[in-house]
Image (cartoon, rainbow, N blue to C red):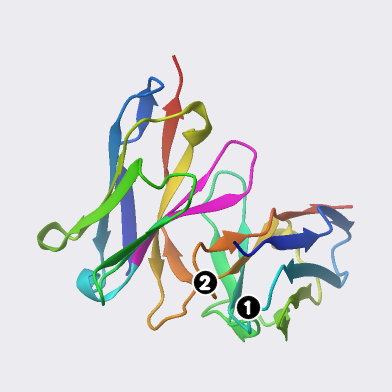
Amino acid sequence: EVQLLESGGGLVQPGGSLRISCEASGFTFSTYAMSWVRQAPGKGLEWVSLFSFSDIRTYYADSVKGRFTISRDISRNTLYLQMNSLRAEDTAVYFCVRRAEGAPAHFDYWGQGTLVTVSS
Amino acid sequence: DIQMTQSPFTLSAFVGDRVTITCRASQTISGWLAWYQQKPGKAPKVLIYKASSLASGVPSRFSGSGSGTEFTLTISYLQPDDFATYSCQQYYDFPYTFGQGTKLEIK
């Protein structure tokens, strides 16, 4: 059974940093592209970043480019999102998402999310 | 960036109704579109991918159609469990983008 378990969310001050994690299980982590999608309170879904294992490339939304870094540790089956220079508008639930096999491909499994709150 | 526009923003319907939600892309995305269902406090769940392919385990009352820039999600016989928010997403090009969501409410 595919499982994605996010952790590391919390309250951080504007300008601060936070790293969130996603532990994956139930599939071969190294063969799937993984992504982060966020949802601000009461708002729609916003794609944030993607790590493509096949060509070791990373992709970012313009809203986070230069501030966020996606990475993975295959030995730990874990995906990370390092978030720096956080702003109030980064407040959201962050979902860890698996992209289905092949590309282009949709998101086929989602974690339950971790809440990041940026506030003083 | 490719903009995804859904309509309507909210939709009220009865159990047993047939409803359709529309998603328009600002440029062609071929058939690289997915539909997700989300309930309050829960993660989204994929219903349809590649515009018209039914995801595993999804009831056949859900269907998708379209290509290019205009797509639809149809629920043929609404069940109480179907009242949720539905979002489309293009994965034709980066940045991936979602529609703003359509909230389906019980009448």
Q: What residue type is labelled 2?
A: Asp
Residue located at (47% from left, 41% from top): A93
Determine which quarter of the picture holds residue A67: top left
Residue beneath disc 2: B93
Residue beneath disc 1: B29
**Tally of numbered tags:** 2
* Crowding near the residue tagged with mark 2, few <14, some 14–19, many ≥20 C-alpha atoms within 10 Å: few
Q: What residue type is labelled 1?
A: Ile
Residue A43 within the segment the image draws in magenta = yes
Residue located at (88% from left, 69% from top): B17
Q: What separation in Å lies between label 1 and label 2 (alpha carbons)?
A: 8 Å
* Crowding near the residue tagged with mark 1, few <14, some 14–19, many ≥20 C-alpha atoms within 10 Å: some
Picture quarter with the C terminus of chain A: top left
Judged left or right of residue A9, residue A39 is right
Magenta highlight range: A34-48
Q: Position of residue A83 (x, y in %)?
A: 33, 38
Nearer the observer, B94 or B35: B94
Residue located at (44% from left, 28% from top): A117
Q: Mark 2 lies on which chain?
A: B
Q: Which residue lies furthest to the top in this view?
A: A120
Determine which quarter of the picture holds residue A102: bottom left
